Amino acid sequence: MHSGITQVNSQKYSIRTFAIGACILSLACSSPEPAAQQQPASSHSVTDAAFGSTASGEDVRLYTLTNSKGEEAKITNYGGIIVSLEVPDREGNLGDVMLGYDSVDDYIKDTPYFGALIGRYGNRIAKGKFTLDGNAYELAVNDGPNALHGGLKGFDKVVWSAEPLAGEESAGLVLSYVSQDGEEGYPGTLSVKVTYRWTNDSEIRIDYEATTDKPTVLNLTNHAYFNLKDGGASSILDHALMIQADGFTPIDETLIPTGEIRPVEGTPFDFRQATAIGARIGDDNEQLKFGLGYDHNFVLNRTGDGLVLAARVSEPTTGRVLEALTTEPGIQLYTGNFLDGHLVGKGGTAYAHRSAFCLETQHFPNSPNQPDFPSTALLPGETYRTTTVYRFTAM
Ligand code: BGC
């Protein structure tokens, strides 16, 4: 059974849903909406606009979630991508902290998963093979010898059904997708629902839910690339990072965990005290060589199944702080090692080497082939539920 099958219930996040159409929550709607469909008395809102279409002609929308402080989160139903997040620095100046593109065409053309939903399996499965219940499955190999992030057409490349969601303390968006039995080689028809909430406390909360009609494996995440200083115009090496992890899962040269859980103590992977990301990234260390920097799963310190603070990142010049909380057992720190300046993103910014960091909350890579890792199996009758929150403040 999937060890992330857990329900996080919190009064703070209780929500009311509304039957809503294309732009019902929009203050910019051109036609007046019937009173019964209007949003509750609060200043947060959801609007949507055209964002282009896919090669097969599917309509893609861009949703703007505005919280009561006027901060905007933009999310598209193509890949469930978080396109931008506007958060204040210590002076209150809003800035976009996400790498991404201005148009869906750019996301379709070439993206290292900027801001996208990842599924069915976040990170790698060795050689694209696993066995479940005595059946062998074979996935497309799309990263050296391994399968990465759901395959050739993972959840980051499909168009999701989207419904705006009005809550008392957030503006939200519910994304749904049914992945067919055998899609990208994975067994079982999988119904997935991802709820994004942009709260009045500047948190992006992501609730993942899924059911299957056959035993399968599942490891959903979001692949946000953050740069708290300027959204990707400069390096993240001066950002200070804390990860609440006593251990990490070392990798081989193809970035597959060896199965060991190694203590971080005395290694460049010890982020238990906040340390600049760049302080030890160039150390003479085999693991850093295999990852070309940090590209590793950390084993989070936790006692129960609930939301725990996994990581905190602060940026010294702007004072922006990001906290990642999750119900998951692991988090992948990836320091933009494969960015090389050839991708030109929002506003014409060329994304250079290490101009972003990712903190992908997850079960451990290659768990289907590692019986000692927390299980990623999902069985019929079970409901997969995980939650991750990225919370922004300034200091
Ligand atoms: C992986 C990296 C990969 C990046 C973008 C991360 O989750 O661990 O190796 O380059 O995603 O695909």
Image (cartoon, grey):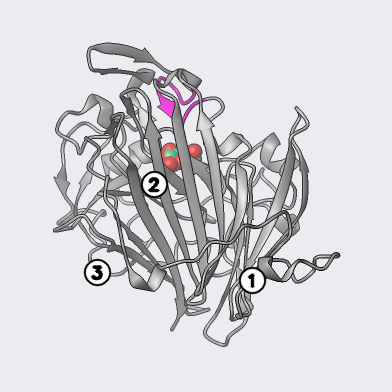
Three-letter residue code for mark 1: Gln
Q: Nearer the viewer, mark 1 or mark 2?
A: 1
Q: Which circle's residue, 1 or 2, is located before the other in the chain?
A: 1
Residue position for label 1: 39
Q: Which circle's residue, 1 or 3, is located before the other in the chain?
A: 1
- Label 2 secondary element: loop
For this orientation, the residue located farthest to the bottom is 91
Residue position for label 2: 293
Q: Quadrant of the C terminus?
A: bottom left
Q: Position of residue 50 (x, y in %)?
A: 79, 50
- Label 1 secondary element: loop
Circle 2 packing at 10 Å, graded few (<14), some (14-19), many (20+), is many
Report the side of 269 relative to 341 (left or right): left
Residue 15 appears in view: yes
Residue position for label 3: 273
Residue 143 colored in magenta in the image: yes
**Which residues fall within the magenta stretch?**
140-151
Label 1 within 8 A of ligand 1 by Cβ: no
Label 1 vs label 3: CA separation? Answer: 44 Å
Which quadrant would residue 313 be assigned to in this image?
bottom left
Three-letter residue code for mark 3: Gln
Circle 3 packing at 10 Å, graded few (<14), some (14-19), many (20+), is few
Residue at (62%, 48%) from the top-left corner?
162
Q: Nearer the viewer, mark 2 or mark 3?
A: 3
Residue 377 colored in magenta in the image: no
Residue at (60%, 80%) from the top-left corner?
42
